[in-house]
Protein backbone atom coordinates (compact mmCIF):
# COMPACT_ATOMS: atom_id res chain seq x y z
CA UNK A 1 0.00 0.00 0.00
CA UNK A 2 1.35 3.38 -0.97
CA UNK A 3 -0.04 6.84 -0.42
CA UNK A 4 1.05 10.02 -2.10
CA UNK A 5 1.94 12.82 0.27
CA UNK A 6 1.13 16.45 -0.41
CA UNK A 7 0.41 19.72 1.32
CA UNK A 8 -3.32 19.09 1.63
CA UNK A 9 -3.23 15.29 1.48
CA UNK A 10 -2.95 12.60 4.14
CA UNK A 11 0.69 11.95 5.13
CA UNK A 12 2.21 8.48 5.32
CA UNK A 13 4.25 8.57 8.56
CA UNK A 14 5.44 4.99 8.18
CA UNK A 15 8.30 6.09 5.91
CA UNK A 16 11.04 8.73 6.09
CA UNK A 17 13.17 10.05 8.96
CA UNK A 18 10.97 9.81 12.10
CA UNK A 19 11.82 13.16 13.69
CA UNK A 20 11.38 15.01 10.42
CA UNK A 21 7.96 13.45 9.84
CA UNK A 22 6.95 14.29 13.40
CA UNK A 23 8.11 17.91 13.16
CA UNK A 24 6.56 18.45 9.72
CA UNK A 25 3.26 17.11 11.00
CA UNK A 26 3.56 18.90 14.36
CA UNK A 27 4.18 22.43 13.06
CA UNK A 28 0.69 22.88 11.54
CA UNK A 29 -0.77 21.36 14.71
CA UNK A 30 1.17 23.86 16.80
CA UNK A 31 0.08 26.80 14.67
CA UNK A 32 -3.47 25.48 14.77
CA UNK A 33 -3.43 25.11 18.54
CA UNK A 34 -2.05 28.62 18.92
CA UNK A 35 -4.68 30.02 16.56
CA UNK A 36 -7.44 28.10 18.34
CA UNK A 37 -6.31 29.50 21.66
CA UNK A 38 -6.80 32.94 20.14
CA UNK A 39 -10.54 32.33 20.42
CA UNK A 40 -10.36 32.53 24.21
CA UNK A 41 -7.51 35.02 24.34
CA UNK A 42 -9.13 37.55 22.02
CA UNK A 43 -12.31 37.23 24.05
CA UNK A 44 -10.31 37.98 27.19
CA UNK A 45 -8.39 40.93 25.73
CA UNK A 46 -11.47 42.56 24.20
CA UNK A 47 -13.59 41.92 27.29
CA UNK A 48 -10.86 43.08 29.66
CA UNK A 49 -10.16 46.25 27.71
CA UNK A 50 -13.73 47.28 26.88
CA UNK A 51 -15.82 45.78 29.70
CA UNK A 52 -13.43 45.76 32.67
CA UNK A 53 -11.74 43.30 35.05
CA UNK A 54 -14.97 41.85 36.47
CA UNK A 55 -16.21 40.88 33.01
CA UNK A 56 -12.77 39.40 32.26
CA UNK A 57 -13.00 37.27 35.41
CA UNK A 58 -16.53 36.16 34.47
CA UNK A 59 -15.46 34.96 31.01
CA UNK A 60 -12.46 33.13 32.49
CA UNK A 61 -14.54 31.44 35.18
CA UNK A 62 -16.65 29.81 32.47
CA UNK A 63 -13.66 27.96 31.00
CA UNK A 64 -13.45 24.95 33.35
CA UNK A 65 -17.19 24.34 33.10
CA UNK A 66 -17.14 24.45 29.28
CA UNK A 67 -14.23 22.00 29.28
CA UNK A 68 -16.21 19.65 31.51
CA UNK A 69 -19.32 19.76 29.35
CA UNK A 70 -17.52 19.10 26.02
CA UNK A 71 -15.96 15.88 27.27
CA UNK A 72 -17.98 13.86 24.74
CA UNK A 73 -16.36 15.79 21.90
CA UNK A 74 -12.90 15.15 23.33
CA UNK A 75 -13.52 11.43 23.69
CA UNK A 76 -15.02 10.91 20.24
CA UNK A 77 -12.34 13.06 18.61
CA UNK A 78 -9.47 11.11 20.19
CA UNK A 79 -11.07 7.74 19.43
CA UNK A 80 -11.68 8.77 15.82
CA UNK A 81 -8.12 10.02 15.39
CA UNK A 82 -6.57 6.78 16.65
CA UNK A 83 -9.00 4.53 14.78
CA UNK A 84 -8.57 6.34 11.46
CA UNK A 85 -4.77 6.44 11.82
CA UNK A 86 -4.55 2.72 12.44
CA UNK A 87 -6.97 1.74 9.68
CA UNK A 88 -5.06 4.00 7.31
CA UNK A 89 -1.76 2.42 8.37
CA UNK A 90 -3.25 -1.03 7.80
CA UNK A 91 -4.54 0.00 4.35
CA UNK A 92 -8.24 -0.52 5.10
CA UNK A 93 -10.36 1.92 3.07
CA UNK A 94 -13.65 0.45 4.22
CA UNK A 95 -12.60 0.73 7.85
CA UNK A 96 -11.71 4.41 7.44
CA UNK A 97 -15.03 5.10 5.69
CA UNK A 98 -17.13 3.42 8.35
CA UNK A 99 -15.18 5.08 11.16
CA UNK A 100 -15.81 8.56 9.73
CA UNK A 101 -19.48 7.84 9.07
CA UNK A 102 -20.04 6.67 12.63
CA UNK A 103 -18.25 9.78 13.92
CA UNK A 104 -20.60 12.15 12.12
CA UNK A 105 -23.68 10.55 13.67
CA UNK A 106 -22.04 10.51 17.09
CA UNK A 107 -21.28 14.24 16.83
CA UNK A 108 -24.95 15.12 16.40
CA UNK A 109 -25.95 12.98 19.39
CA UNK A 110 -23.15 14.35 21.56
CA UNK A 111 -23.96 17.98 20.68
CA UNK A 112 -27.60 17.52 21.66
CA UNK A 113 -26.55 16.06 25.01
CA UNK A 114 -23.97 18.78 25.70
CA UNK A 115 -26.42 21.57 24.92
CA UNK A 116 -29.31 20.09 26.90
CA UNK A 117 -27.34 19.12 29.99
CA UNK A 118 -25.20 22.26 29.92
CA UNK A 119 -28.13 24.67 29.84
CA UNK A 120 -29.68 22.89 32.82
CA UNK A 121 -26.66 22.75 35.11
CA UNK A 122 -24.57 25.81 34.18
CA UNK A 123 -25.93 28.33 36.68
CA UNK A 124 -26.47 25.85 39.56
CA UNK A 125 -22.87 24.70 39.08
CA UNK A 126 -21.60 28.27 39.22
CA UNK A 127 -23.53 28.81 42.44
CA UNK A 128 -22.18 25.60 43.94
CA UNK A 129 -18.64 26.76 43.18
CA UNK A 130 -19.09 29.97 45.19
CA UNK A 131 -18.68 32.15 42.11
CA UNK A 132 -18.65 35.78 43.34
CA UNK A 133 -22.05 37.49 43.01
CA UNK A 134 -20.52 40.25 40.90
CA UNK A 135 -19.49 37.67 38.27
CA UNK A 136 -22.21 35.04 38.20
CA UNK A 137 -24.76 36.71 35.88
CA UNK A 138 -22.24 37.47 33.13
CA UNK A 139 -20.60 34.07 33.52
CA UNK A 140 -23.95 32.24 33.22
CA UNK A 141 -24.94 34.29 30.17
CA UNK A 142 -21.59 33.58 28.47
CA UNK A 143 -21.98 29.85 29.17
CA UNK A 144 -25.55 29.64 27.85
CA UNK A 145 -24.60 31.19 24.53
CA UNK A 146 -21.49 29.03 24.06
CA UNK A 147 -23.41 25.85 24.85
CA UNK A 148 -26.20 26.78 22.45
CA UNK A 149 -23.62 26.69 19.64
CA UNK A 150 -21.95 23.45 20.71
CA UNK A 151 -22.80 21.66 17.44
CA UNK A 152 -20.18 23.74 15.61
CA UNK A 153 -17.62 23.12 18.33
CA UNK A 154 -18.34 19.39 18.17
CA UNK A 155 -18.06 19.07 14.41
CA UNK A 156 -14.85 21.05 14.22
CA UNK A 157 -13.01 19.32 17.06
CA UNK A 158 -14.02 15.79 16.12
CA UNK A 159 -13.50 16.15 12.38
CA UNK A 160 -10.12 17.71 13.07
CA UNK A 161 -9.33 14.50 14.93
CA UNK A 162 -10.29 12.54 11.82
CA UNK A 163 -8.05 14.71 9.62
CA UNK A 164 -5.15 14.36 12.06
CA UNK A 165 -5.56 10.60 12.04
CA UNK A 166 -5.17 10.71 8.27
CA UNK A 167 -1.99 12.74 8.64
CA UNK A 168 -3.55 15.95 7.30
CA UNK A 169 -2.70 18.74 9.73
CA UNK A 170 -2.67 21.51 7.12
CA UNK A 171 -6.32 21.68 6.08
CA UNK A 172 -7.66 22.09 9.62
CA UNK A 173 -5.07 24.82 10.21
CA UNK A 174 -6.21 26.81 7.17
CA UNK A 175 -9.86 26.56 8.22
CA UNK A 176 -9.00 27.55 11.77
CA UNK A 177 -7.08 30.62 10.64
CA UNK A 178 -10.06 31.74 8.57
CA UNK A 179 -12.40 31.22 11.52
CA UNK A 180 -10.05 33.00 13.93
CA UNK A 181 -9.85 36.09 11.74
CA UNK A 182 -13.64 36.13 11.65
CA UNK A 183 -13.74 35.68 15.43
CA UNK A 184 -11.45 38.67 16.00
CA UNK A 185 -13.47 40.88 13.67
CA UNK A 186 -16.77 39.88 15.27
CA UNK A 187 -15.35 40.27 18.79
CA UNK A 188 -14.40 43.87 18.18
CA UNK A 189 -17.61 44.57 16.24
CA UNK A 190 -20.01 43.05 18.79
CA UNK A 191 -18.29 44.15 22.00
CA UNK A 192 -16.58 47.43 21.13
CA UNK A 193 -18.83 48.49 18.25
CA UNK A 194 -22.30 47.36 19.29
CA UNK A 195 -21.68 47.36 23.07
CA UNK A 196 -23.15 43.86 23.45
CA UNK A 197 -21.10 42.88 26.52
CA UNK A 198 -19.98 39.30 27.22
CA UNK A 199 -22.79 37.92 25.05
CA UNK A 200 -21.13 39.57 22.05
CA UNK A 201 -17.85 37.74 22.77
CA UNK A 202 -19.71 34.44 23.07
CA UNK A 203 -21.65 34.99 19.83
CA UNK A 204 -18.45 35.82 17.96
CA UNK A 205 -16.93 32.53 19.14
CA UNK A 206 -19.82 30.24 18.16
CA UNK A 207 -20.23 31.88 14.73
CA UNK A 208 -16.52 31.41 14.00
CA UNK A 209 -16.58 27.81 15.24
CA UNK A 210 -19.58 27.08 13.04
CA UNK A 211 -17.70 28.30 9.97
CA UNK A 212 -14.66 26.12 10.74
CA UNK A 213 -16.96 23.10 11.18
CA UNK A 214 -18.58 23.64 7.77
CA UNK A 215 -15.15 23.88 6.11
CA UNK A 216 -14.04 20.59 7.73
CA UNK A 217 -17.15 18.78 6.47
CA UNK A 218 -16.61 20.07 2.92
CA UNK A 219 -12.98 18.92 3.04
CA UNK A 220 -13.92 15.39 4.05
CA UNK A 221 -16.54 15.19 1.31
CA UNK A 222 -13.79 15.95 -1.25
CA UNK A 223 -11.35 13.25 0.00
CA UNK A 224 -12.72 10.53 -2.26
CA UNK A 225 -9.24 9.19 -3.06
CA UNK A 226 -8.75 8.20 0.59
CA UNK A 227 -12.17 7.06 1.82
CA UNK A 228 -15.87 7.14 0.91
CA UNK A 229 -18.00 9.80 2.58
CA UNK A 230 -21.24 8.13 1.55
CA UNK A 231 -24.73 8.22 3.08
CA UNK A 232 -24.66 4.48 3.70
CA UNK A 233 -21.89 4.97 6.24
CA UNK A 234 -23.80 7.65 8.18
CA UNK A 235 -25.18 5.30 10.81
CA UNK A 236 -24.31 3.80 14.14
CA UNK A 237 -22.57 0.41 13.85
CA UNK A 238 -21.77 -1.42 17.04
CA UNK A 239 -18.27 -2.52 16.09
CA UNK A 240 -17.08 0.88 14.87
CA UNK A 241 -18.91 3.04 17.38
CA UNK A 242 -17.75 0.65 20.10
CA UNK A 243 -14.16 0.88 18.87
CA UNK A 244 -14.24 4.67 18.85
CA UNK A 245 -15.72 4.78 22.34
CA UNK A 246 -13.33 2.17 23.75
CA UNK A 247 -10.41 4.26 22.55
CA UNK A 248 -12.00 7.64 23.14
CA UNK A 249 -13.78 7.23 26.48
CA UNK A 250 -10.53 7.07 28.48
CA UNK A 251 -9.42 10.33 26.85
CA UNK A 252 -12.85 11.78 27.59
CA UNK A 253 -12.60 10.63 31.19
CA UNK A 254 -9.16 12.25 31.33
CA UNK A 255 -10.77 15.50 30.18
CA UNK A 256 -13.43 15.12 32.87
CA UNK A 257 -10.75 14.59 35.49
CA UNK A 258 -8.85 17.63 34.24
CA UNK A 259 -12.00 19.76 34.22
CA UNK A 260 -13.12 18.53 37.63
CA UNK A 261 -9.71 19.25 39.11
CA UNK A 262 -9.82 22.73 37.58
CA UNK A 263 -13.30 23.28 38.99
CA UNK A 264 -12.24 22.13 42.46
CA UNK A 265 -9.22 24.43 42.36
CA UNK A 266 -11.46 27.18 40.95
CA UNK A 267 -13.63 26.83 44.05
CA UNK A 268 -10.47 27.39 46.10
CA UNK A 269 -9.44 30.32 43.91
CA UNK A 270 -12.84 31.98 44.27
CA UNK A 271 -12.11 32.49 47.98
CA UNK A 272 -9.32 34.89 47.05
CA UNK A 273 -11.66 37.32 45.27
CA UNK A 274 -12.20 38.86 41.83
CA UNK A 275 -8.70 40.36 41.55
CA UNK A 276 -7.06 36.96 42.03
CA UNK A 277 -9.49 35.37 39.56
CA UNK A 278 -8.69 38.00 36.92
CA UNK A 279 -4.95 37.41 37.41
CA UNK A 280 -5.53 33.66 37.13
CA UNK A 281 -7.45 34.16 33.87
CA UNK A 282 -4.53 36.11 32.41
CA UNK A 283 -2.05 33.49 33.60
CA UNK A 284 -4.17 30.69 32.17
CA UNK A 285 -4.35 32.40 28.77
CA UNK A 286 -0.57 32.84 28.59
CA UNK A 287 -0.01 29.35 30.01
CA UNK A 288 -2.28 27.87 27.36
CA UNK A 289 -0.03 29.29 24.62
CA UNK A 290 3.10 28.09 26.42
CA UNK A 291 1.73 24.54 26.58
CA UNK A 292 0.92 24.43 22.87
CA UNK A 293 4.25 22.90 21.71
CA UNK A 294 3.98 20.10 24.30
CA UNK A 295 0.38 19.37 23.33
CA UNK A 296 1.17 19.53 19.62
CA UNK A 297 4.07 17.11 19.96
CA UNK A 298 1.78 14.82 21.96
CA UNK A 299 -0.91 14.88 19.24
CA UNK A 300 1.71 14.31 16.55
CA UNK A 301 3.06 11.33 18.49
CA UNK A 302 -0.45 9.84 18.64
CA UNK A 303 -0.81 9.93 14.85
CA UNK A 304 2.78 8.77 14.31
CA UNK A 305 2.42 5.84 16.70
CA UNK A 306 -1.04 5.02 15.34
CA UNK A 307 0.05 4.71 11.73
CA UNK A 308 3.25 2.82 12.53
CA UNK A 309 1.62 0.41 14.98
CA UNK A 310 -1.15 -0.18 12.43
CA UNK A 311 1.58 -1.06 9.90
CA UNK A 312 3.36 -3.31 12.43
CA UNK A 313 6.45 -1.05 12.62
CA UNK A 314 7.08 -1.27 16.36
CA UNK A 315 10.82 -0.50 16.17
CA UNK A 316 10.14 2.61 14.12
CA UNK A 317 7.48 3.62 16.64
CA UNK A 318 9.98 3.45 19.51
CA UNK A 319 12.68 5.35 17.63
CA UNK A 320 10.29 8.12 16.65
CA UNK A 321 8.97 8.33 20.19
CA UNK A 322 12.47 8.87 21.57
CA UNK A 323 13.25 11.59 19.03
CA UNK A 324 9.90 13.31 19.56
CA UNK A 325 10.24 13.39 23.36
CA UNK A 326 13.71 14.95 23.17
CA UNK A 327 12.50 17.66 20.78
CA UNK A 328 9.40 18.42 22.86
CA UNK A 329 11.27 18.69 26.16
CA UNK A 330 13.94 20.99 24.68
CA UNK A 331 11.32 23.24 23.05
CA UNK A 332 9.22 23.54 26.22
CA UNK A 333 12.31 24.29 28.32
CA UNK A 334 13.19 27.20 26.03
CA UNK A 335 9.64 28.55 26.24
CA UNK A 336 9.69 28.37 30.03
CA UNK A 337 12.91 30.37 30.16
CA UNK A 338 11.47 32.97 27.80
CA UNK A 339 8.31 33.40 29.90
CA UNK A 340 10.38 34.11 33.02
CA UNK A 341 11.57 37.24 31.20
CA UNK A 342 8.42 38.24 29.31
CA UNK A 343 5.74 37.51 31.92
CA UNK A 344 5.05 41.14 32.83
CA UNK A 345 4.74 42.63 29.32
CA UNK A 346 2.50 39.74 28.29
CA UNK A 347 0.22 40.24 31.30
CA UNK A 348 0.04 43.97 30.53
CA UNK A 349 -1.69 43.20 27.23
CA UNK A 350 -4.83 42.17 29.12
CA UNK A 351 -5.18 44.94 31.72
CA UNK A 352 -3.65 48.15 33.05
CA UNK A 353 -4.37 47.25 36.67
CA UNK A 354 -0.92 47.05 38.29
CA UNK A 355 -1.90 44.62 41.05
CA UNK A 356 -3.30 42.14 38.54
CA UNK A 357 -0.26 42.44 36.25
CA UNK A 358 2.21 41.78 39.08
CA UNK A 359 0.20 38.86 40.40
CA UNK A 360 -0.07 37.30 36.93
CA UNK A 361 3.68 37.62 36.43
CA UNK A 362 4.37 35.67 39.64
CA UNK A 363 1.99 32.89 38.61
CA UNK A 364 3.55 32.62 35.14
CA UNK A 365 7.08 32.32 36.53
CA UNK A 366 6.03 29.48 38.84
CA UNK A 367 4.42 27.47 36.03
CA UNK A 368 7.28 28.04 33.58
CA UNK A 369 9.55 25.87 35.73
CA UNK A 370 7.50 22.76 34.96
CA UNK A 371 6.99 22.91 31.20
CA UNK A 372 9.68 20.34 30.40
CA UNK A 373 7.94 17.80 32.64
CA UNK A 374 4.62 18.58 30.99
CA UNK A 375 6.15 17.99 27.54
CA UNK A 376 7.30 14.55 28.62
CA UNK A 377 3.82 13.71 29.90
CA UNK A 378 2.10 14.71 26.63
CA UNK A 379 4.55 12.83 24.41
CA UNK A 380 4.61 9.57 26.36
CA UNK A 381 0.82 9.62 26.73
CA UNK A 382 0.50 10.38 23.01
CA UNK A 383 2.58 7.36 22.02
CA UNK A 384 0.61 5.06 24.31
CA UNK A 385 -2.72 6.34 22.97
CA UNK A 386 -1.59 5.98 19.37
CA UNK A 387 -0.68 2.37 20.08
CA UNK A 388 -4.21 1.81 21.39
CA UNK A 389 -3.35 1.93 25.10
CA UNK A 390 -5.74 4.65 26.29
CA UNK A 391 -6.59 3.32 29.76
CA UNK A 392 -3.12 3.73 31.26
CA UNK A 393 -2.81 7.46 30.39
CA UNK A 394 -6.28 7.92 31.85
CA UNK A 395 -5.32 6.36 35.19
CA UNK A 396 -2.07 8.28 35.29
CA UNK A 397 -4.02 11.51 34.76
CA UNK A 398 -6.41 10.62 37.56
CA UNK A 399 -3.50 10.03 39.92
CA UNK A 400 -1.69 13.16 38.78
CA UNK A 401 -4.69 15.45 39.16
CA UNK A 402 -6.80 14.00 41.97
CA UNK A 403 -4.00 12.28 43.81
CA UNK A 404 -1.54 15.15 43.54
CA UNK A 405 -2.67 18.48 42.10
CA UNK A 406 -5.98 19.03 43.96
CA UNK A 407 -4.88 17.69 47.39
CA UNK A 408 -1.62 19.65 47.17
CA UNK A 409 -3.46 22.87 46.32
CA UNK A 410 -5.72 22.63 49.36
CA UNK A 411 -2.95 21.33 51.63
CA UNK A 412 -0.43 24.00 50.74
CA UNK A 413 -3.00 26.78 51.12
CA UNK A 414 -4.07 25.32 54.46
CA UNK A 415 -0.48 25.10 55.75
CA UNK A 416 0.26 28.71 54.80
CA UNK A 417 -2.75 30.25 56.56
CA UNK A 418 -2.23 33.16 58.92
CA UNK A 419 -4.36 35.90 60.52
CA UNK A 420 -3.44 38.15 57.59
CA UNK A 421 -4.00 35.36 55.03
CA UNK A 422 -7.00 33.34 56.26
CA UNK A 423 -7.12 31.26 53.07
CA UNK A 424 -3.35 30.82 52.74
CA UNK A 425 -0.79 32.09 50.25
CA UNK A 426 -2.35 32.58 46.80
CA UNK A 427 0.70 31.29 44.94
CA UNK A 428 0.31 27.84 46.49
CA UNK A 429 -2.37 26.88 43.96
CA UNK A 430 0.26 27.34 41.24
CA UNK A 431 3.03 25.65 43.21
CA UNK A 432 0.75 22.60 43.44
CA UNK A 433 0.34 22.62 39.66
CA UNK A 434 4.12 22.82 39.17
CA UNK A 435 4.63 19.86 41.51
CA UNK A 436 2.02 17.83 39.63
CA UNK A 437 3.86 18.48 36.33
CA UNK A 438 7.11 17.06 37.73
CA UNK A 439 5.59 14.10 39.57
CA UNK A 440 3.32 13.28 36.62
CA UNK A 441 6.29 13.14 34.25
CA UNK A 442 8.07 10.73 36.58
CA UNK A 443 5.02 8.46 36.73
CA UNK A 444 4.59 8.42 32.96
CA UNK A 445 8.27 7.63 32.43
CA UNK A 446 8.17 4.65 34.81
CA UNK A 447 5.08 3.22 33.10
CA UNK A 448 6.33 4.00 29.59
CA UNK A 449 9.60 2.17 30.24
CA UNK A 450 7.72 -1.02 31.08
CA UNK A 451 6.58 -1.15 27.44
CA UNK A 452 3.23 -2.85 27.96
CA UNK A 453 1.68 -0.36 25.52
CA UNK A 454 3.46 -2.24 22.73
CA UNK A 455 0.98 -5.08 23.14
CA UNK A 456 -1.84 -2.98 21.66
CA UNK A 457 -2.10 -3.83 17.97
CA UNK A 458 -5.28 -2.48 16.44
CA UNK A 459 -6.42 -2.41 12.81
CA UNK A 460 -5.29 -5.45 10.86
CA UNK A 461 -4.80 -7.30 14.13
CA UNK A 462 -4.61 -10.86 12.82
CA UNK A 463 -2.08 -10.23 10.08
CA UNK A 464 -0.11 -7.82 12.32
CA UNK A 465 -0.01 -9.97 15.46
CA UNK A 466 2.77 -12.24 14.24
CA UNK A 467 4.87 -9.28 13.13
CA UNK A 468 5.01 -7.85 16.65
CA UNK A 469 5.00 -11.10 18.58
CA UNK A 470 1.46 -10.95 20.00
CA UNK A 471 -1.39 -13.36 20.34
CA UNK A 472 -4.73 -12.57 18.69
CA UNK A 473 -6.35 -12.33 22.14
CA UNK A 474 -4.17 -9.31 22.90
CA UNK A 475 -5.48 -7.36 19.94
CA UNK A 476 -9.25 -7.21 20.36
CA UNK A 477 -10.01 -3.51 19.91
CA UNK A 478 -11.14 -3.17 16.29
CA UNK A 479 -13.14 -5.18 13.78
CA UNK A 480 -11.03 -6.87 11.12
CA UNK A 481 -10.05 -4.87 7.98
CA UNK A 482 -12.28 -5.52 5.01
CA UNK A 483 -10.68 -3.82 2.04
CA UNK A 484 -7.17 -2.67 1.23
CA UNK A 485 -6.25 0.60 -0.45
CA UNK A 486 -4.94 0.33 -3.96
CA UNK A 487 -2.64 2.73 -5.70
Image (cartoon, rainbow, N blue to C red):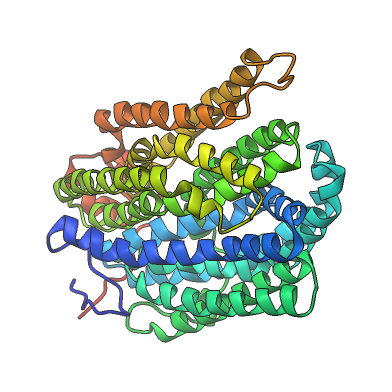
Would you say 142 lies left or right of 377 here?
right
How many marks can you see? 0
Position above or below: 396 against 216: above
Front-lying residue, 439 or 189: 189
- Rendered location of residue 11, percent (x, y): 26, 70
Q: Is residue 99 visible?
A: no
At horizontal 30% and vertical 30% (from top left) the residue drawn is 445
At horizontal 24% and vertical 58% (from top left) the residue drawn is 22
Q: Can you say which quadrant of the picture contains the N terminus?
A: bottom left
In the picture, residue 206 is in which quadrant?
Answer: bottom right
At horizontal 72% and vertical 58% (from top left) the residue drawn is 113
- Rendered location of residue 192, percent (x, y): 73, 75
Q: Is residue 272 visible?
A: yes
- Rendered location of residue 317, percent (x, y): 20, 49
Position above or below: 211 against 200: below
- Rendered location of residue 199, percent (x, y): 78, 67
Would you say 434 lies left or right of 69 here?
left
In the picture, residue 24 is in which quadrant?
Answer: bottom left
Q: Can you say which quadrant of the picture contains the C terminus?
A: bottom left
At horizontal 32% and vertical 80% (from top left) the residue drawn is 8
Position above or below: 47 against 204: above
Front-lying residue, 141 or 113: 141
Amino acid sequence: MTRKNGLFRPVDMTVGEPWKQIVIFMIPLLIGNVVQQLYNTVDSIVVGRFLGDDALAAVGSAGPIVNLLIVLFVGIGMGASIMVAQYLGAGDREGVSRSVGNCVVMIVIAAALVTGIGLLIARPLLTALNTPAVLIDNCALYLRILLSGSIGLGFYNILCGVLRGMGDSISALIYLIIASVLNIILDVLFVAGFGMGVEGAALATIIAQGLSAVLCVLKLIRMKDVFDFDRKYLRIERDYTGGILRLGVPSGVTQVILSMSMILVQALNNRFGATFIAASVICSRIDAFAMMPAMSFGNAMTTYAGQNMGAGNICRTEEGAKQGIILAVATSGAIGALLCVLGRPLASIFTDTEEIVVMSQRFIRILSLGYMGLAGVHCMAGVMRGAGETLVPMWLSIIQLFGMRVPLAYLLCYLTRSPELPYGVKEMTYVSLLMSFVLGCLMHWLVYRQGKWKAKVVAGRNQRATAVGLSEEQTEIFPEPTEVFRE
